[in-house]
Image (tube, rainbow, N blue to C red):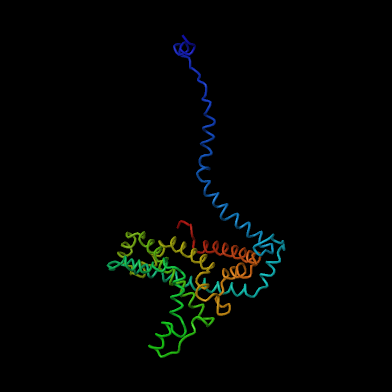
């Protein structure tokens, strides 16, 4: 009879040796969460942190894309803040951003309210029509808008002459009207896309609160301001921050439609960086402008998050 059996019969507790693989198993379990989330951090490091670091380094150099970069320190930044074209690009980008923000938010909300109305027929068709500009190629959109706003043969000038008898407007060759056309193009492309977000938010508005407000005698306008709009706050915050950050980096619309002209009247900061990097082969100078743009967009995004209350539970 073994010692363990004798102790069991006498009522004494038996002691068992711990498994040799227990410590290793606990260690593997403690590392398992980090292993599962590691792809995000690897991709974050490779595609965000490393490019930012390389861009910051190149902004301190003079480099044409070949050979070894020449260290110049802060000379690129000094030159950048003394460049009138850069200030023109910043001013144009601010106009595009403010012009888009002031129109696209209320316009998208109004269209979403109309599409969400009870008894609306062909609702899915209207949603598809409003969303269609998002999936159309930007090159096709720019070509169509160029034909519409052509000074001599454009559809817009043809209508103004036929209806009002007014002379044609120099849409793409006048500095003021060229900015207006770029803003119209941005609105046409993205209003339907943002409308879908508002429409999704309207689907989650509490019907009980609407009915309670209606029973209390609140009219449609009062119900909108007191019930619907407060519940759309998270969606409005998301759209506001997205529009601000995206429009601050605008490139495709003015580049394809006016190439930054006439002169530099529609030149954006992203176009300024493109010209410096790929037309003049001044990659160090373009990197300095890119670093300034990154810092400005980051700060604007943080301010917009505070203003719109994104991420807050209210």
Q: Position of residue 9 (x, y in %)?
A: 44, 11
Question: Seen in the image, is 89 located left or right of residue 240?
Answer: right
4 versus 305 height, above or below? above
Residue at left 59%, top 73%? Answer: 89
Closer-to-camera residue (224/297): 297
Q: Position of residue 265 (x, y in %)?
A: 56, 78
Question: Seen in the image, is 60 located left or right of residue 121?
Answer: right
Classify residue 129 by image quadrant: bottom left
Furthest toward the bottom, the residue is: 165
Residue at left 49%, top 78%? Answer: 180
Classify residue 136 by image quadrant: bottom left
Q: How many discs appear?
A: 0
Q: Position of residue 104 (x, y in %)?
A: 45, 70
Residue at left 57%, top 62%? Answer: 298
301 versus 152 height, above or below? above
Classify residue 133 by image quadrant: bottom left
34 versus 233 height, above or below? above
Furthest toward the top, the residue is: 1
Please state, as top left, top right, bottom left or bottom right, where the C terminus lies in the image: bottom left
Q: Position of residue 201 (x, y in %)?
A: 39, 61
Closer-to-camera residue (273/198): 273
């Amino acid at each position: 009879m073994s010692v363990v059996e004798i102790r069991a019969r006498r009522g004494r507790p038996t002691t068992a040796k711990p498994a040799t693989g227990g410590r290793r198993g606990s260690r593997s379990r403690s590392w398992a969460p980090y292993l599962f989330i590691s792809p995000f951090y690897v991709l974050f490091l490779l595609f965000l942190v490393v490019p930012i670091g390389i861009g910051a380094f190149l902004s301190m150099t003079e480099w044409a894309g070949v050979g070894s970069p020449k260290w110049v320190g802060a000379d690129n930044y000094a030159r950048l803040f003394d460049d009138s074209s850069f200030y023109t690009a910043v001013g144009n980008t601010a106009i595009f951003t403010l012009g888009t923000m002031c129109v696209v938010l209320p316009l998208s909300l109004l269209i979403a309210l109309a599409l969400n109305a009870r008894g609306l027929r062909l609702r899915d068709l209207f949603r598809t029509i409003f969303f269609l500009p998002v999936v159309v190629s930007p090159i096709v959109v720019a070509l169509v808008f160029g034909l519409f706003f052509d000074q001599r043969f454009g559809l817009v000038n043809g209508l103004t002459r036929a209806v009002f008898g007014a002379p044609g407007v120099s849409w793409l060759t006048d500095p003021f009207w060229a900015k207006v056309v770029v803003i119209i193009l941005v609105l046409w492309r993205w209003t339907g896309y943002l409308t879908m977000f508002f429409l999704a938010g309207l689907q989650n508005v509490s019907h009980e609160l609407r009915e309670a407000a209606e029973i209390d005698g609140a009219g449609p306008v009062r119900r909108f301001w007191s019930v619907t709009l407060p519940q759309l706050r998270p969606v409005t915050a998301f759209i506001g921050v997205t529009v601000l950050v995206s429009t601050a980096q605008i490139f495709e619309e003015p580049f394809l439609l006016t190439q930054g002209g006439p002169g530099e009247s529609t030149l954006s900061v992203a176009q300024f960086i493109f010209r410096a990097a790929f037309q003049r082969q001044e990659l160090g100078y373009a990197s300095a402008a890119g670093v300034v743009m990154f810092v400005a967009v980051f700060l604007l995004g943080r301010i917009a998050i505070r203003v719109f209350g994104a991420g807050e539970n209210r």
